[in-house]
Image: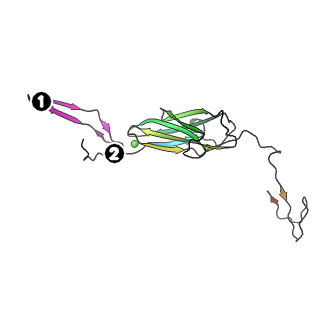
Amino acid sequence: MNSNLRMAHGSRVYVTVIARNAADLITRATSDPVVIDLTPPIIHAVADGRDLNDVDFSANDSALTFSWSASDPESGIDHCTWAVGSGPGLDDILPRSSSPDATSSITASLSQIMVEGQLLYVTVTCYNHAEQSSWKSSDGVTIVTVPPGSTTAAVIVKTMSDTQYESRNGYQSQRHSLKAS
Ligand SMILES: [Ca+2]
Ligand SMILES: [Ca+2]
């Protein structure tokens, strides 16, 4: 083992062994090249949607579709993992699963999980052949299956008075502003 080497990032290193036996016969063997990769994979994008098309809302609470793209110019992608969580980097909704692909679109089942109204984040971690990793999360998708209706969405208008007396609800003497909550 030679630990006193300075190998440049991206360079190919060959190891050659020369063996000499007692009869002075020499054998030479050279290894396959080893690529020196000092940088982790690059994750270009993680999207809440198919083919890197990101969405921020989904009406489907039984499945979640997401996609990613990653590469490593020196050693290549060995595999990636994905997980779904309630925040970036978390896997509390769906635990980590492995994928062999550097670029992929996946639809994961959300059945048996209550996700209505939740903001979900997909986190992808990719590993290169030099065993380095990096991760990236999507910017999130909110699962909304219940359409907003007049029974659930209500605007309350608070009337404003110019005088010290409270105006009665439904009437106001102020022309310039309206309070809504
Ligand atoms: Ca690299
Ligand atoms: Ca999104």
Please tell me the numbered disc located at residue 118.
none
Q: Position of residue 142 (x, y in %)?
A: 66, 43
- Other residues around mark 1 within 10 Å, as few (<14) / some (14–19) / many (≥20): few
Q: Earlier in the sequence, mark 1 or mark 2?
A: 2
Identify the coloring. Answer: rainbow
Q: Is residue 51 left or right of residue 132?
A: right
What amino acid does circle 1 point to? Asn
Q: Quadrant of residue 173?
A: bottom right
Range covered by the magenta-colored residues: 11-40
Residue at numbered disc 1: 21
The residue mark sitting in front, 1 or 2, is: 1
Q: Position of residue 134 (x, y in %)?
A: 46, 44
Local SS, label 2: loop
User: Which residue is rendered at x = 34% and y = 42% of the image?
Assistant: 10
Q: Position of residue 118 (x, y in %)?
A: 67, 43
Does residue 27 belong to the magenta stretch? yes
Quadrant assignment for ligand 2: top right
- Other residues around mark 2 within 10 Å, as few (<14) / some (14–19) / many (≥20): few
User: Which residue is rendered at x = 87% and y = 67% of the image?
Assistant: 161
Local SS, label 1: loop
Residue at numbered disc 2: 9
Q: Position of residue 19 (x, y in %)?
A: 16, 32
